[in-house]
Image: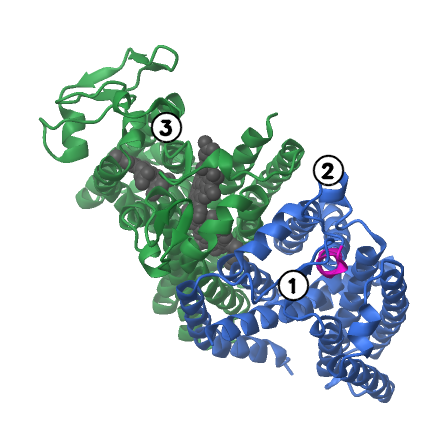
Amino acid sequence: MDDFIAARSQMALSLGFHIIFSCIGMVMPFFMAVSHYKWLKTNNEVYKNLTKAWSKGVAIFFATGAVSGTMLSFELGLLWPKFMDHAGPIFGMPFSLEGTAFFIEAIALGFFLYGWNKLNKWFHWFTGMVVGVSGLASGILVVAANAWMNSPAGFDFANGQYLNIDPIQAMFNKAWFSQALHMCLAAFTATGFAVAGVHALMILRDRNREFHLKAFKIAAVFACIGALLQPLSGDISAKDVARRQPAKLAAMEALYKTEKPAPLLIGGIVNEQDKTISGAIKIPGALSFLAHGDFGAEVKGLDQIPENEHPPVAVTHYAFQIMVGIGTLLMLIALVYFFNLIKRKPLLEQPWLLKLFVMAIPLGYVALEAGWVVTEVGRQPWIIYGIMRTKDAVTPMPGIAYSFYIFSAIYFSLSIIVTFLLYRQIKMVPVLYAKTESK
Amino acid sequence: MMKDVVITFLCIAILLYFLLGGADFGAGIIELFTSTKNRSKTRKTMYQAIGPVWEANHMWLIIAIVILFVGFPFIYTTMSVYLHIPLAIMLIGIIARGTAFVFRHYDAVKDDMQWLYNRIFRYSSFVTALFLGIIAGSLISGHIDTQATDFYTAYISGWLNWFSIAVGLFTVALCGFLAAIYLIGETKEAHDKKRFIKKAEVMNVAAVVFGAMVFIAAQRDKIPLIDWVFKSSVGLWAIVLASLSLVLLWYLLIKGKTKVLRILAGFQVTMILLAISYAHFPNFIRLKSGDAISLLTTVGPEKTIYSLGLALLLGSVLILPFLGYLFYKFQKKEE
Ligand code: HDD
Ligand code: HEM
Ligand code: HEM
């Protein structure tokens, strides 16, 4: 394997791995806080057990998130030293604030996990909230760093020099808001559907009904609110991309030719050699509207962009289709669920709805990974958009392929173990939280 | 001004990572060298001792790294390129031990899997501490060659040399020592206390032996370690204080006064680090060409340093009270 490809793959793998755990770390504390609040208010033992059961899951994920995150902070240098030489001082601001957020999160988690019966109960609840809020804050901050790569700001670039550096301006770059908003919603949607789905499965199997029903309801509400807002925020993102990265937008839509008005293409097979797409469904004018809010607007195609600045079209396009397809589906599930809630139809008489949620377990995460592929692959060949090329940033050290194989093996085994542990946690629920038990 | 603030934070973060993270690695190392019949007890004590704070302990590494890549990017990238291999091994160690530590505690079923987690935890604790030391040693060893043209000189000999390895082993022993001292205060049973005291003794002896090895290797590799330590008054004082505190520490141990031990052990390690690093501070990496990369000359642009310093100050105002309370709350035993 070519070293450059290996470095990109290793980066993608590490980030793709980390994001799953960090989303759980950002979102689960809020689920727990709701359940914990209900326990404190109602004194219903089930809520306490639920909070504890979730917190054990979170501890497993948190540790995995923390070590993979530590890995990433080194990996930026191990794989992209020439990028970090220049980028570090510019986009470092969010990272240094993020450090604070992580620290607070780690401390609060210590209090939360070990504080049962040791702390004032409302202070204990509060520490759980702090875990969630600081997790969310760190997510927003780190996305600001990524957004800077898409939309560099806060410096002047002249003759290969980075001058007049202003880290604050770099942090509040143009891509930051839309990306951070979309990312936070994605975390809630993806984690919410995954958690709700697992509990739905348990309800269908008729295990500890009350426990799982309560869990399901908390997770499903978060998931569905996220899923309803996600397309709106996605639209903001798309308009943003059209403005700042026309090449990425063209790749997302496999728009090889500039068109006015431009149709929205759904699906289709991309042929990168011939620069064509076949078999796609065309919705006339829709892309113009999505990108510029006007059905007649012109949308820049790849023909207006120098060939050596084209991102990989097929990957970006397929990934975008997957994300939007899943986004639409999840939105529909959310609508059905809320409709059910309003009509006050009992969930247990609607096994098909529960089955829908079971089916959706992986979907949110698939959409989330796909979305990142759109953002990151769509930025290629740039590591700093318009400023530095990815291939100029890669480490001079040969043999990165081996490093990629080793880390792949590690991430693969970790995924297996984490899944296995989670399976065991769920399997043990009846034993650990039988009615009389309150340990 | 802000530059000094940032450098101070960097030093504090590195020091605390050595002390707290080190004690944490040490716990695994101790477990590795504990006879099978006492292991589960050691493990329990250890979990009670470090469980609540272990996540926070490892944040210092991230703080240090972030300060480096934001404030001193050239140092960060030089390390990343020329010490790629040991850094990657250390990272694998961090991943393995961090996850094994949590997995073995949170696995809902306690069965044969525990065997695997334990193995991974112990060996990776050892490897991580070893490579942490190797990396630290390599930075000052003067073996890093940024002009190298062949793979071996550029990416291997910078860290695979006697001096770095001796520092690595010395670090392992110090970590074990810190952990043993820490654990003495965590047990109530006299029998266990004795065991940990014994461990502390063994680790102490190991540290002395490996420390001597460090000096020998330095002589052999023409690293002016002796000059650094004995020709600068700060280095000399630090070594004297470290030795005095060691004597005091053993006296108190024999007397069975465990309260101040930790502070003394921490103080001692701090003094050792000070002795080794003071003379060439603020040089951070010594190169084969004879040049050195200094914190002062590679510092990032002014505005960056200013906001980094501000972020760190702000962060510590938010963090320190909270962290202090965490340590306090879980130090108090349920008496
Ligand atoms: C649960 C996950 C999820 C779902 C259902 C959606 N997205 Fe998304 N999307 C993400 C998760 C995500 C993401 C992983 O979080 C990304 C990657 C980078 C980012 O900021 O968010 C992303 C990026 C992203 C981008 C690129 C942003 C950029 O490069 O700055 C666009 C244009 C969209 N999305 C648009 C949409 C639309 C129109 C959706 C309609 C249904 C949609 N997304 C659903
Ligand atoms: C966690 C969610 C993220 C995922 C899943 C993700 C995914 C990816 C993928 C797939 C690539 C490879 C692109 C290619 O080479 O074709 C990549 C590259 C990269 N990403 Fe991300 N990314 C994420 C967030 C971030 C963030 C927050 C940052 C930085 C602050 C970042 C920095 C980078 C860098 C430096 C590269 C390598 C250079 C490049 O290929 O352009 N990523 N990422
Ligand atoms: C979009 C991308 C990312 C998001 C949303 C994100 C979010 C998070 C969150 C919420 C955590 C807390 C740990 C947990 O709850 O499991 C975490 C951990 C961590 N992340 Fe990320 N992260 C992202 C990418 C990155 C990148 C690119 C880096 C480094 C360059 C990074 C470095 C870290 C570190 C060092 C930790 C460990 C902190 C701890 O011990 O709590 N993350 N991340």
What color does chain B have in the rendering?
blue
Quarter of the image holding residue A274?
Answer: top left
* Disc 1 residue type (three-letter): Phe
Please, which chain is the residue tagged with disc 1 on? Answer: B
Q: Which residue is mark 1?
A: B284
Instruction: Work out whether B332 lies above or below A280.
Output: below
The answer to whether the beta carbon of the residue marked 2 is less than 8 Å from any atom of ligand 2 is: no
Q: Are marks 1 and 3 in contact (CB under 8 Å)?
A: no
User: Real-space Cα distance between discs 2 and 1?
Assistant: 23 Å
Q: Is residue A235 magenta?
A: no
* Disc 3 residue type (three-letter): Glu
Q: Are marks 2 and 1 in contact (CB under 8 Å)?
A: no
**Are labels 3 and 2 on one chain?**
no
**Left or right: A29 in relation to A398:** left
Magenta segment range? B134-142
Is residue A387 among the parts visible in the rendering? yes
Is residue A22 among the parts visible in the rendering? no
Q: Which residue is mark 2?
A: B151
* Residue name at image x 31 percent, y 50 percent: A176
Instruction: Work out whether A228 lies above or below A134.
Output: above
Depth check, front residue: B145 or A181: B145
Please, which chain is the residue tagged with disc 3 on? Answer: A
User: Real-space Cα distance between discs 3 and 2?
Assistant: 33 Å
Q: Secondary structure at mark 3?
A: helix
Q: Which residue is mark 3?
A: A309
* Disc 2 residue type (three-letter): Phe
**Left or right: B237 in relation to B50:** right
Answer with mark 2 or mark 1, whichever residue precedes in sequence.
2
Q: Percent from the top left, x then y, of residue B169? A: 82, 60
Assign ligand 2 to one image quadrant: top left
**Crowding at mark 1 (Cα within 10 Å: few <14, some 14-19, many 20+):** some
